Image (spheres, rainbow, N blue to C red):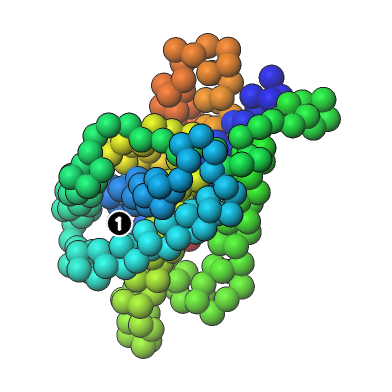
Amino acid sequence: MLGSVFAGIGDGFLLFLIASGLTLIFGVMRILNFSHGGYFMLGGYFVYQAVASGSPISLPLPLFVLAVVGGALAVGVVGIATERLIFRKIYRLSDIASLLGTFGLLLVIEGVAEIIWGVNPMSVPFPTALGRSIVVGGVRVGTYSIVLIAVGIVVAVGLWALLWRTAFGERARAVAEDRYVCELAGVNTALVSTSVFALGTVLAGLGGALATPLIALTPDVATAFIIEAFAIVIVGGLGSISGAMIAAIGFGVADSLAITYYPPLSGVIFFILMFVVLLVRPQGLVSNARGLA
């Protein structure tokens, strides 16, 4: 059981990467970005493209690390381009209009991926030394789960430091509270929005890149993961980074236990937990009516 819990924590931190970017973008720009799953998917495909010429059986760890970092940064570049060309036009639209616009962008990203890579499932092998398991305190755990947990913790601490210990974080939180007042005060809200959007898409791309050894990569994973990310963000509390982390870990552990003890419940457990939590606490685990938390 402890092994399943540990694996679930690793999966939870992987989900946290995409959910944190989603809730960060919502917290600052007040946009429910359905296209966020597309950036996750692109991160996976960029890693696949980077290592496609290598061995299908073994993957050198340095190459994998470079591919993951490069893939995440490449997704950030795509994010900057779409923010400037598309999202700036929909910031002040109604919630329904912006939601439909981002959903349309998701379909476009999926369509482009189908044209470039096709619809057949693609896979990336585990990097050397990370595809095995070790015994820790009598519990067998996967080394890749340890990596996911470590990356997730670094990202969580980094986001906290960025948002609460830097001048940029102060501006981002101010824009999240009241964009109009910030504009009157001379804050470059467009630059803040672009920077936050780029960071959010980098996190999504990082999640997709790290997921490649664990999933069958197809364009459809964009939709599958954005649904799970929305469930996490809603349960955690819209705009709350800490809430997203708590919800992601909880969902990851619950899904891992379901896979181990009752597989038919896997996947569905996300929505069962979401229903139960929202019945008890409709505002989410971490209440945040406005701004970032």
Residue 249 location (% of width, % of height): 57, 38
- At x 46%, y 20%, the residue is 266
Residue 25 location (% of width, % of height): 38, 59
The N terminus lies in quadrant: top right
Q: Is 65 or 108 nearer to us in this picture?
A: 65
What is the tally of numbered marks visible in this picture?
A: 1
Q: Which residue is farthest right?
A: 137
Residue 172 location (% of width, % of height): 45, 71
- Judge the density around disc 1: few (<14), some (14-19), many (≥20) Cα neighbours within 10 Å: many
Res. 151 visible in picture = yes
Image quarter for residue 90?
Answer: bottom left
Image quarter for residue 215?
Answer: top left
Q: Is 224 or 144 nearer to us in this picture?
A: 144
- Seen in the picture, residue 64 relative to 250 is either above or below; the reply is below
Residue 158 location (% of width, % of height): 60, 62
Query: Is residue 185 rendered to the left or right of residue 147?
Result: left
Q: Which residue is farthest bottom?
A: 186
- At x 61%, y 67%, the residue is 161
Q: Amino acid at mark 1?
A: Ile
- At x 83%, y 30%, the residue is 137
Q: Is 12 or 269 nearer to us in this picture?
A: 12
- At x 58%, y 12%, the residue is 261
Q: Pointer 1: what residue? A: 31
- Seen in the picture, residue 28 relative to 113 is either above or below; the reply is below
Instruction: Kindly state the secondary structure of the residue where label 1 is placed.
Output: loop
Query: Is residue 83 rendered to the left or right of residue 76?
Result: left
Res. 231 visible in picture = no
